[in-house]
Image (spheres, rainbow, N blue to C red):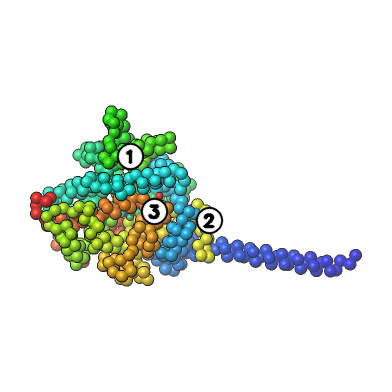
Amino acid sequence: MDISPILPTAVLILIVFYFLWRSKHSRATVLLRLPPGPHAWPIVGNLFQLGKKPHESLHALSLQYGPLMMLRLGMKTTVVASSPAMAKEILKTHDLALAGRSVIETAKALSFHKTSIIWGECGAQWRHLRRIAASELFNPRRLADLQPLRRDQVFRTIRLIFEERGKAVDIGHMAFNTSVNLLGNMIFSSSLFDTHNPATVRFIDAVWKMMKLGGKPNWVDYFPFLRFLDPQGLCRETAKHMKGMYDFADSCIHDRLAARSKNQGSNDSEKDYLDILLDFISEDFTLVGVRGYIAELFIAGTETTTTTIEWVMAEFIRNPQKMKMVRRELDEIVGGNRRVEESDLDSLHYLHAAVKEIFRLHPTAPLLMPHKAESACKIGEFVIPKGSEVMVNVWAMGRDPAIWKEPLEFIPERFLEDENSKLEYKGQNYQLIPFGSGRRMCVGLPLASRMVHLVVASLLHSFEWTLPDGMRCEEMDMSEEFRITLKKSKELNAIPIPRLPHHIY
Ligand code: HEM
């Protein structure tokens, strides 16, 4: 048999197959292109490039590597988005794939993560817990029912400040106490949340210490094999304070259950959050779930609102012209003979613009909460690998000169003019997403927004604020500290001078 034509044909077929395979393979490689990023060092990867202010370092890196970049932080692969377009890809287009969470080690203290909304996987339990928050705790009707309670607590703060008038107030600390009291009273009602009770004081102290611990970078998160050593002791410390919170919650739950077994129960509009949560008790949502839920509300809701209030006050004190504007509005709408009520808030347009400006300039969670890719997905030409941590640098977006004029200045007016007047922070406008967007968006937004506006309006309406020791406003230190939230690194102390008739206080 003459084989000579077979051999060349076979070789030809092999060559064709090879090129077909190669073209398919190289297409796959193109498909699998990872986002660009800085060179990662062995073992530590890019950890040391994060520095003390990761939001700033990541912003600087994004100017070099683009709005979607990848880093290696110890053993973690992290993808960072730094533009509204990329934020939209992550939080809307690929919302489902990227809505996971990689649980940090301190959140595992006393199994907190197992009953948590923040750390929960996007499964049935997480949906159930979120639904309780959205439809029972933070719905407009419930928030309206609890409005007198918030008013009393805010007014209590104003009275305390009035009694100490002339002395410098640590605004951050005062805002923290106010936020804890507001939440504490909505959850437990004032009968249980008594700040003269040593147990309540211990509880508040535990919340405060948890917040301080939460912001510390933990080596175990980057090198999970160190878990059993807990080299910085952060997990042990967190567990100690978490236990303090749980003990308090447990005793409140116990007392309430006892009271409920005697009474017929309160009518719906009189219920506090504890009552509502107890109404949901089931096989899947036990008393352990309720106490975890309570701890979570404090963890998620106090430091965030506190930080925002402190920044709004700091920017107003530093900008007397803007302070005049907001005062003019308060005097017009509220006047000088009564306190601010929540019903006034809708008419305080300048104040709303100022709070938006703070969310832009000093977002409380500059990188949101890290998400996790539950499955791989493709953004543009890049692939986000399954299991990566995904962050959105909202701080960088808020200071991008391509989006905002004079981005480093505090100019509330920008939200009253032109196109920007339509911008909201409720997750639709990706250049302003301090609460995130999509299925993982902050579930406490309706309450947070009321708390921040009410507290700030009351502080500005009730007092003039001057700086201690003759400090001039331009000398104020406005630097930031990256903790669990983006705090003002130097606390804001200011002296209150009453501006209303004294009988109003
Ligand atoms: C100014 C105040 C607040 C800000 C700026 C804020 C911001 C945020 C952000 C950025 C997230 C993560 C979004 C994401 O992962 O993409 C979040 C989640 C969350 N926030 Fe807030 N928050 C505030 C107040 C509150 C309050 C008052 C509560 C409740 C009392 C609350 C409860 C939660 C919860 C439960 C989550 C987890 C949602 C989930 O993972 O499904 N937040 N918040």
> Mark 1 to mark 3: distance in Å?
22 Å
Q: Which residue is mark 2?
A: 376
Q: In the rendered view, does 7 fall on the left or right side of 448?
A: right
Does residue 23 appear in this view?
yes
Of 271 and 60, the residue lying toward us = 271
The amino acid type of the residue labelled 3 equals Met
Question: Are the residues flagged by discs 2 and 3 in contact, CB closer than 8 Å?
Answer: no
For disc 2, does the CB lie below 8 Å from ligand 1? no
> Mark 2 to mark 3: distance in Å?
21 Å
Q: Which residue is mark 1?
A: 276
Q: Which residue is mark 3?
A: 441
> Which of the image's four quarters has the N terminus?
bottom right
The crowd level at tag 3 (other Cα within 10 Å; few <14, some 14-19, many 20+) is: some
Position of residue 111 relative to residue 461, above or below, is above
- Image quarter for residue 66? bottom left
- Image quarter for residue 240? top left
Does label 2 or label 3 sit earlier along the sequence? Answer: 2
Does label 1 or label 3 sit earlier along the sequence? Answer: 1
